[in-house]
Structures are given as structure tokens and as C-alpha cells.
Amino acid sequence: AQSVTQLDSQVPVFEEAPVELRCNYSSSVSVYLFWYVQYPNQGLQLLLKYLSGSTLVESINGFEAEFNKSQTSFHLRKPSVHISDTAEYFCAVSSMNRDDKIIFGKGTRLHILP
Amino acid sequence: DAGVIQSPRHEVTEMGQEVTLRCKPISGHDYLFWYRQTMMRGLELLIYFNNNVPIDDSGMPEDRFSAKMPNASFSTLKIQPSEPRDSAVYFCASSSNRDFSYEQYFGPGTRLTVT
């Protein structure tokens, strides 16, 4: 079975400052990794994913995450945040078995300070 | 495509009443998931279907909860009788096995309040 730990429930950061949202996972098998974002009063939407290949993956709005197998981590970073990045971010993991469910972390709420 | 459609968006009901939440997945998607989100417990997977067949219902909290998927374009989650602790946002999501992206597409959710 897989599990996901998001170490911070809330992260405040000033606008235009860099941010890192931490995610660690546990699994006895190879995994796929995801970051989903939930804007206020909306459902979750996929931000980026790691399935295979390059360990550094990027989103269209400037976020990136690096799969680190030795540290079992998939931290999310952005060099300069904007007020529009205010949202809750969920790290998720799934085994490579197609019928296995995706396990979501408890989420990290990103607060952008003016 | 209109995305995943959920109805109603908001539901307020009294304890003991039956509640039915509805979901229309994206056309062509063969997986459908029901989640519950609360401040205390975060996002919980309740049940998921593949090709209209329930695969894993281990997250369904108790017998008061039931879910059906009579066809590829419709699913329901029913709570009978409802209790105040069922108050939460319920999300439906769907995905496709064919594109190998493993991405789940979430609906806007149903906010349930049981008084």
C-alpha cells in the first residue's frame, strides 16, 4: 500500500517570493506521483505529474516538482508566486497497477501575502 | 466537453432524511470515483467504479452509504438516513484508461449540510 505525507498544512509566503511545498511518499512498489490544486470553492485539478522519464516535471503556470527516489520525495516549487496561486495543493501517489486508486495527501494551503 | 457534472451543488437537509447526490462523468471515461472532503479528515476516497462495476468500496463509512452506477454516464451516492457528521463536500471524479495519463477530472462538488 502507498501513503503520502504533506509536512505542512499551511504555508504563508509573500508575493513574488519562492515557495516549496513538501511531499514524501511511502511505497513498496514503483509509483506514479501527482500534484493537484484546488482553488477556492472548486474541485481538484491536475497541476503536474511524474509517470516516467525526466525526474523534473513542470506545469504551464511555473510550478515544478522533482521526483527523488532515494528520498521518496516529490516536492513542489515555484520561484516566484502570485496572488492567483492562492489555493490548496494536494500531493498524490498511485502504484503502477492501473486498478489501484490514487492516494491523496491531506493538502497544503498556500497563503500569498501582499 | 462539459467536464464532470454534479448535482445538486448545495444540499441542506435534516437529520434522518435521505440524500441523493448525482454525477455525470466525462463521456468516454471508464473510471468513476466518489470522494468526501472535510476539514478534519481531508479528502477521502469512498468508492470507485470501472466500467460501471464497483471495484473498491472500502472507504464507504457505513451501511448508510450506498453508490450505484447503472450506466456509463450516471452515478449516484445515497445516504440514508443522513446524520450531521455526514456534512462535507462530496466530489465525483472520472478518468480514462485509454490515454494512460492517470489524470482524474473532478467535478465542482456537492456541499452537503445535515442539520
Image (cartoon, rainbow, N blue to C red):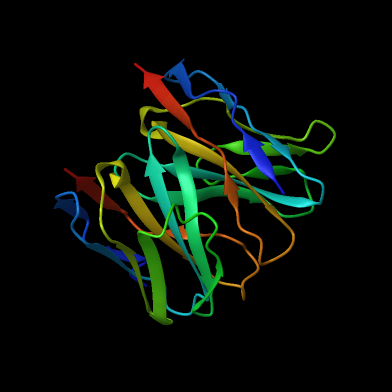
Residue A72, image quadrant: top right
Residue B20, percent from left and from top:
26, 65
Residue B107, percent from left and from top:
36, 59
Frontmost residue, A69 versus A84: A69
The residue lying at 32 percent from left, 39 percent from top is: A40
Residue B67, image quadrant: bottom left
Judged left or right of residue A8, residue A15 is left
Frontmost residue, B33 versus B65: B65
Q: Does A8 sit above or below residue B100?
A: above
Q: Does B98 sit above or below residue A95?
A: below
Frontmost residue, B16 versus A79: B16
Q: How many marks?
A: 0
Quadrant of the frame with the C terminus of chain A: top left
Residue B101, percent from left and from top:
62, 63
The residue lying at 16 percent from left, 43 percent from top is: B115
Residue B34, percent from left and from top:
43, 60
In the displayed orientation, state which residue is furthest to the bottom: B71
In the displayed orientation, state which residue is furthest to the right: A70
The residue lying at 50 percent from left, 18 percent from top is: A17
Let me know if residue B111 appears in the view: yes
Judged left or right of residue B63, residue B47 is right
Let me know if residue B7 appears in the view: no
Frontmost residue, B64 versus B53: B64
Residue B64, image quadrant: bottom left
Q: Does A9 sit above or below residue B64?
A: above
